[in-house]
Amino acid sequence: MRWYFDFISPFAYLAWPRVRALLRERPVELRPILLAGLLERHGHKGPAEIEGKRLFTYRHALWRARRAGLPMRFPPGHPFNPLAALRLCLALETRPDVVQAIFDWIWAEGRAGDSAEALAPLAARLGIADVAAAITAPAVKQALRDNFEAAVGEGVFGVPTLVVNGEPFWGEDAMDFALEVLRDPELLQEPEFRRLAGLPVAQGRS
């Protein structure tokens, strides 16, 4: 299993506790990726780029966090550039404690995660004195590019996405679906699920 995520997504933050619980049961590869790259690749807009949908999305995320008993405070601005946070995570080998710390910094404490300067106190706490050097290391940049290409190769189009047995499950609200397929790999082979794969498009948009 692989979990693709971007710290820009409040729904990735909401999904993370269940992914971390899953990690205690079986291996899950944690792969930070740049959501903006996926949006560009697929010609999509992010929810925060659509008038009306932006406020609804923020309210929905906050409501779901409260319902789940998770602290949530939005960062100073959103959407923001998450490259520094993604690269910091990779510089520290995407350890679960690092993923947790960065999510908490941005989404529980409501702090900025859009630059080396903003992340410097957190990086110091995690053992990195020169965060600017760490996040500009060629190997770190390449790792982020590799994760992106791997995501595209697995059919990932958004975050968070949990890939189970080669099938991508997108969204925090798809976790139950993903876990059921994990328990019962034959589920997607049932006739009606199989029929969906060849369902014709009845009307397109020009």
Image: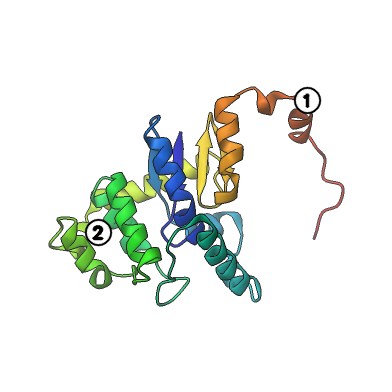
Under tag 1, what secondary structure? Answer: helix
Image-based side of 81 in relation to 36, left or right: left
Residue on which the image places disc 2: 135
The chosen color scheme is rainbow
How many other residues sit within 10 Å of disc 1, few (<14), some (14-19) or many (≥20)?
Answer: few
Furthest residue to the right? 202
- Which residue appears at 60% of the width and 24% of the height? 185
Residue on which the image places disc 1: 191
The answer to whether one can see residue 141 in this image is no
Q: Along the line of sight, which residue is nearer the eye, 26 or 116?
A: 26
The location of residue 124, given as percent across then percent down, is: 16, 62
Under tag 2, what secondary structure? Answer: helix
The location of residue 192, given as percent across then percent down, is: 79, 30
Image-based side of 175 in relation to 12, left or right: right
- Which residue appears at 40% of the width and 68% of the height? 81
Amino acid at dot 1: Pro
Closest to the camera, between mark 2 and mark 1, is 1
